[in-house]
């Protein structure tokens, strides 16, 4: 049985990706802290989904995940989708526990969950959900930018260290997506006005990507792209060079 694990699967990109992969006959292990949305997914697809309610950022949560996967011998792919943007605040106002939470979710969880599952991932794939903020600094986003920059470097280190197992490690920027995180960003008053206006206008002008479009892109990466291609670059959904392979005639909104 082919198994794909998705963290942060209770909503947004994670939930949409689970449904897209199920439509392609994959078996999904959906992981998130919130149990009810996971149960809703399980109820819709009882034979194609296993759910695990766990906090991937904690040692106990990761142990729970590993224990729940004891009967699974081979994992096709592990998708590190869980992420947080908080704290959104000037550096002078960030509290230590907020900072540590961001690092634990965005960087430590992918590292140590991958580490724990390496024996089951031989011939499989690990996919990091990245962001432009890993490469571009934004005011009030220091915790998010730094943790995602660390995740990008982790992708580069892992793809070197795991190549001989072999495990293919990839990284993808899914674009600016119409999710709860985007709503959270628009609700913040700590960002500079021009950045807040930028995100508000994207929403108002229907330029946010749908989670379904992103899920189609990620499904293509996980199932159709060759392993060496999967790992060799960080994939950007806005890069038109690969659109013909998966976009099915849709045109992505332009952003500036």
Image (spheres, rainbow, N blue to C red):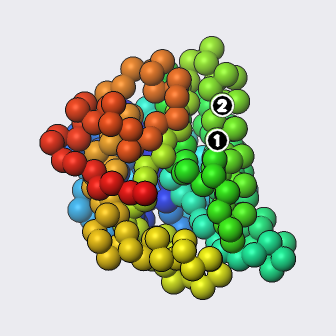
* Residue at 45% from the left image edge and 21% from the top image edge: 229
* Residue at 39% from the left image edge and 44% from the top image edge: 237
Q: Percent x, y for residue 197?
A: 48, 77
Q: Compared to 253, does 151 lie above or below? A: above
* Residue at 43% from the left image edge and 57% from the top image edge: 256
Question: Residue 218 falls in which quadrant of the image?
Answer: top left
* Image-based side of 133 in relation to 251, left or right: right
Q: Compared to 246, does 59 lie above or below? A: below
Q: Percent x, y for residue 246?
A: 25, 36
Q: Nearer the viewer, residue 15 or 248?
A: 248
Q: Percent x, y for residue 101?
A: 72, 67
Which residue bears the numbered disc 2? 156
Q: Percent x, y for residue 124?
A: 48, 27
Q: Is residue 127 visible?
A: no
Q: Are marks 1 and 2 in contact (CB under 8 Å)?
A: yes
* Image-based side of 249 in relation to 190, left or right: left
* Quadrant in which the N terminus appears: top left
Which residue bears the numbered disc 1? 152
Question: Label 2: few (<14), some or many (≥20) within 10 Å?
Answer: some
Question: Label 1: few (<14), some or many (≥20) within 10 Å?
Answer: many
Q: Nearer the viewer, residue 14 or 144?
A: 144
Q: Compared to 168, does 204 lie above or below? A: below
* Residue at 38% from the left image edge and 74% from the top image edge: 201
* Image-based side of 174 in relation to 48, left or right: right
Q: For numbered disc 2, what is the local secondary structure?
A: helix
């Amino acid at each position: 049985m082919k198994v794909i694990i998705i963290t942060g699967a209770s909503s947004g990109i994670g939930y949409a990706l689970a449904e897209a992969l199920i439509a392609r006959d994959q078996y999904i292990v959906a992981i998130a802290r919130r149990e009810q949305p996971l149960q809703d997914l399980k109820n819709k697809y009882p034979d194609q989904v296993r759910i695990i309610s766990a906090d991937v950022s904690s040692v106990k949560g990761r142990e729970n995940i590993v224990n729940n996967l004891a009967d699974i011998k081979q994992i096709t792919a592990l998708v590190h989708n869980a992420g947080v943007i908080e704290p959104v605040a000037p550096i002078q106002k960030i509290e230590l526990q907020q900072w540590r939470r961001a690092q634990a979710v965005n960087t430590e969880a992918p590292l140590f969950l991958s580490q724990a599952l390496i024996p089951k991932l031989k011939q499989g794939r690990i996919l990091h959900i990245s962001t432009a903020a890993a490469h571009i600094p934004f005011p009030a986003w220091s915790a998010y930018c730094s943790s995602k920059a660390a995740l990008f470097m982790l992708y580069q280190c892992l793809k070197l260290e795991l190549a001989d197992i072999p495990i293919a490690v990839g990284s993808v920027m899914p674009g600016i997506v119409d999710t709860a995180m985007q709503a959270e960003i628009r609700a913040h008053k700590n960002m500079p006005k021009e950045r807040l206006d930028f995100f508000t206008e994207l929403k108002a002008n229907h330029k946010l990507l749908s989670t379904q479009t992103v899920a189609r892109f990620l499904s293509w990466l996980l199932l159709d792209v060759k392993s060496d291609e999967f790992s060799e670059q960080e994939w950007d959904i806005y890069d038109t060079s690969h659109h013909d392979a998966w976009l099915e005639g849709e045109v992505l909104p332009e952003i500036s």
